Image (spheres, helix red, strand yellow):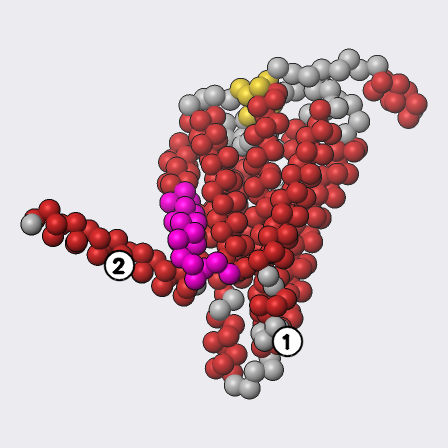
């Protein structure tokens, strides 16, 4: 029987469709209101992340290794939002459900690369924080600009390589069953399941990539905070321990916002309604880019002080200009 199936697969005519149909939000009641909400989230994400990048660029006091990682996180969030939200709104709000084969692979590449980098950025930030608490006297010697830039470059290369391999494995598939992708973008899983030849390599690589982009980062972050908790436990008074730990609540919030929705959907995705799964997955990809800059602005004293300085400087310039014109 296995030989017959193998022979049948070998005789399948290779079919590369001219287009795919994105069907994720089709049929969900009152979905247009959700797209208005997505547009609002996108505007906040663009403004917030652009503001964080500008502040870090202009303020020389924020040129530390930590803020290189924060800048890269803001850039990744901006890329993620810009790659996903406008296209999703265009597809479903204006009924442009058809997307060409090559455009679909390009769409998938940018979406997944930026989403993967969000998780990897949290690893870099965790590494920076654990080094700061474990080696406070030698932090500047151990964590240099070059080290952080090297880590970021490595993770960018890793994310791009993973997506290129995934896209390459998709190009070997023959899509003779259907061209309807049951997702809100060109999602790798729903795409390879449309293949009518052997999808075992695609499934195996998807499982491996899931471990690399979710399992490894989450394990590293949990381990790093165990080390941080152990170091904080050595502080003499409870008040000092709480004060020290508050400096890490912002990063923990980012970790929870990124990992918990994905983990919940992948664990319980088979028992929840397909429409609820689509909404949950879309929210887990569009909310972190909006919330990350808000959390960093509210939780990081250095960024708040820099914003105050820039705002005060701009107000002073406006007053001077008004005085000049009045004279």
Q: Residue at x 71, y 29 (%)?
A: 168
Q: Which residue is mark 2?
A: 312
Query: Eyeballing the image, is 296 above or below 214?
Result: below
Q: Relative to 82, is 263 on the left or the right?
A: right
Q: Nearer the viewer, residue 285 or 278?
A: 285
Q: Can you give x and y, in whole percent of width and height, for residue 197 in the image? A: 78, 23
Mark 1 / mark 2, whichever is N-terminal:
1
Q: Relative to 92, is 113 on the left or the right?
A: right
Q: Nearer the viewer, residue 224 or 277?
A: 224
Which label was assigned to residue 230? 1
Rendering quarter of residue 22? top right
Which quadrant: the N terminus? top right
Q: Relative to 151, is 79 on the left or the right?
A: left
Secondary element type, mark 2:
helix
Q: Residue at x 70, y 43 (%)?
A: 209
Task: Characterize the magenta stretch by its predominant secondary structure.
Answer: helix
Q: Is residue 60 in the magenta section?
A: yes
Q: Can you give x and y, in whole percent of width and height, for residue 13 in the image? A: 77, 13
């Amino acid at each position: 029987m296995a030989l017959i199936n193998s022979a049948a697969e070998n005789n399948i005519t290779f079919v590369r469709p001219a287009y795919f149909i994105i069907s994720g939000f089709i049929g969900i009641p009152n979905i247009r209101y959700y797209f208005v909400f997505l547009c609002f989230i996108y505007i906040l994400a663009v403004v917030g992340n652009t503001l964080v990048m500008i502040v870090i660029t202009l303020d020389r006091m924020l040129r530390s290794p930590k803020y290189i990682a924060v800048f890269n996180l803001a850039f990744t969030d901006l890329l993620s939002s810009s790659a996903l939200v406008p296209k999703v709104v265009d597809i479903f709000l204006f009924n442009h459900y058809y997307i060409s084969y090559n455009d679909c692979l390009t769409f998938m590449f940018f979406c997944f690369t930026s989403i993967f980098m969000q998780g990897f950025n949290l690893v870099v930030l965790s590494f920076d924080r654990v080094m700061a608490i474990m080696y406070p006297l030698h932090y500047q010697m151990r964590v240099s600009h070059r080290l952080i830039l090297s880590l970021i470059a490595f993770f960018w290369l890793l994310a791009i390589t993973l997506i290129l391999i995934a896209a390459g494995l998709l190009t070997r598939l023959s899509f003779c069953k259907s061209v309807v992708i049951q997702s809100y973008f060109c999602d790798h899983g729903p795409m390879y399941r449309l293949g009518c030849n052997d999808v075992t390599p695609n499934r195996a690589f998807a499982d491996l990539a899931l471990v690399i982009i979710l399992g490894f980062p989450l394990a590293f972050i949990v381990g790093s905070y165990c080390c941080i908790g152990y170091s904080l436990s050595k502080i003499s008074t409870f008040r000092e321990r709480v004060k020290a730990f508050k400096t890490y609540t912002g990063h923990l919030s980012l970790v929870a916002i990124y990992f918990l929705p994905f983990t919940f959907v992948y664990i319980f995705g088979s028992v929840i309604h397909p429409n609820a799964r689509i909404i949950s997955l879309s929210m887990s990809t569009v909310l972190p880019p909006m919330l990350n800059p808000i959390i960093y602005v509210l939780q990081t004293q250095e960024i708040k002080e820099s914003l105050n300085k820039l705002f005060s400087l701009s107000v002073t310039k406006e007053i001077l200009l008004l005085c000049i014109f009045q004279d």
